[in-house]
Image: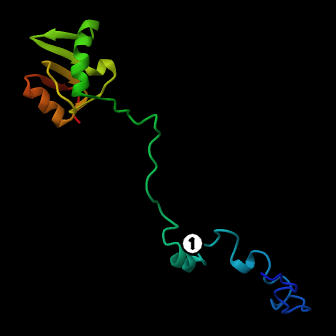
Amino acid sequence: MVVRREKKSRKMHGYRNRGWGSIGQHRKSGSRGGRGAAGLHKHKWSWIVKNYRDWFGKKGFVPRNPSYVPKVIEINIGQLNEIASKMLKSGTAVIDNGKIVIDLSKIGVNKLIGDGEITHLVKVFVWSASEKAIEKIRKIGGEVILLRNK
């Protein structure tokens, strides 16, 4: 590109206010209706309607503080099947009427989900369980006792 040697605009040179009236006009915030977001609910409302329809009002949601959100710790039926015998040995589970009684809340688990297969007859105490998990355990003769409803 060729370097521009002269100024872009030579208009109004030599005129005190360059065509903006008397002194002080086209200066400071009065010429634009206030600084920043001033007047957006008043005299600049037509600008809001044209450019930012959703400027005012609430949108979306603010999630709760993560420390208050209960953490869901899940276990699969397949994993439960693997650890059932280990729990018997360690004493966290007992046998009652031929069923291994497991309280998942004692080991910090609050949901039972239905992935995997189970071969042990179990009686499981848990806060919540998926329908698939309950169905699989009942199918082999076990039972699921929910400590509270979903």
Q: Residue at x 20, y 30 (%)?
A: 116
Q: Which residue is mark 1?
A: 41
Q: Residue at x 59, y 72 (%)?
A: 40
State the SS at label 1: loop
Quarter assignment of residue 5: bottom right
Q: Relative to 86, say whether 17 is above or below.
A: below
Which residue is at the far front? 1
Quarter assignment of residue 76: top left
Total residue callouts: 1
Whether residue 147 appears in this view of the structure is: no
Could you tell me the amino acid type at mark 1? His
Q: Residue at x 82, y 90 (%)?
A: 21
**Of residues 74 and 4, the one drawn nearer to the viewer in this rendering:** 4
Q: How is the image coloured?
A: rainbow
Whether residue 89 appears in this view of the structure is: yes
Residue density around tag 1, few if under 14, some if 14–19, many if 20 or more, within 10 Å: few
**Of residues 113 and 63, the one drawn nearer to the viewer in this rendering:** 113
Quarter assignment of residue 10: bottom right
The picture places residue 11, in percent across and down from the top left corner, at: 84, 92
Q: Residue at x 29, y 21 (%)?
A: 105
Q: Quadrant of the C terminus?
A: top left
The picture places residue 108, in percent across and down from the top left corner, at: 34, 22
The picture places residue 37, in percent across and down from the top left corner, at: 63, 68
Q: Relative to 17, say whether 122 is above or below.
A: above
